């Protein structure tokens, strides 16, 4: 490295400044190349965890609804000789409730944003 004498003191030449700038640029590029995959993996894990949580909640709701219809609603209606097909069918009632549930959760999600 060449140092030049100046009446004010030692002057650093341009080659040192160029090397410093190159090292900063390379540090930036390496940091970006490391951080992008890490951010991707963390985000992917969070999305999967959230979707599994919502899916489990939906599955629990559907199971609870079917049990409620089969144990609480259907026997009373059959004893009273009132046959209401959509009410006594667990699948129909569950699909209706699930559609309302997904519409409500979608609306709630949209309100958050």
Image: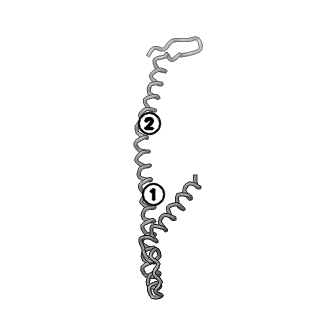
Q: Residue furthest bottom?
A: 79
Query: Residue 97 location, x and y as percent?
Result: 49, 68
Which element is circle 2 on? Answer: helix
- Color scheme of the displayed model: one colour
Q: Residue at x 42, y 45 (%)?
A: 40
**Which residue does the image show at 41% across and 71% down from the upper left?**
91
What residue is shown at x 45% (from left), y 67% (from top)?
Answer: 95
Q: Do the numbered discs 1 and 2 sit on residues whose CB atoms are within 8 Å?
A: no
Camera-nearest residue between 54 and 45 = 54
Residue 11: x and y in percent read 53, 16
In front: 66, or 80?
A: 80
Residue 32: mark in rendering: 2
Q: CA distance from mark 1 to mark 2?
A: 27 Å
Is 71 located above or below residue 35 in the figure?
below
Q: Relative to residue 9, is residue 50 depicted above or below?
A: below
Instruction: Kindly identify which residue carries mark 1.
Output: 50
Q: Position of residue 18 (x, y in %)?
A: 47, 20
- SS for tag 1? helix
Mark 1 or mark 2, which is nearer to you? 1
Q: Which label's residue is closer to the chain start, 1 or 2?
A: 2
Residue 15 on image: x %, y %: 46, 17
Q: Which mark is residue 11?
A: none
Determine crowd level at label 1: few under 14, some 14-19, many 20+ residues with C-alpha closer than 10 A: few
Which of 7/58 is in front? 58
Q: Residues within 10 Å of mark 2 (few under 14, many from 20)?
A: few
């Amino acid at each position: 490295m060449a140092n030049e004498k100046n009446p004010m003191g030692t002057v650093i030449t341009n080659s040192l400044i160029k090397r410093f700038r190159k090292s900063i640029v390379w540090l930036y590029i390496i940091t970006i190349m490391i951080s992008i995959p890490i951010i991707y993996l963390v985000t992917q894990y969070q999305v999967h965890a959230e979707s599994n949580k919502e899916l489990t909640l939906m599955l629990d709701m559907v199971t609870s609804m079917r049990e409620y219809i089969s144990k609480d609603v259907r026997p009373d209606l059959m004893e009273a000789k009132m046959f209401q097909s959509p009410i006594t069918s667990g699948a129909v009632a569950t699909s209706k409730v699930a559609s309302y549930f997904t519409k409500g959760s979608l609306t709630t999600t949209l309100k958050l944003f």
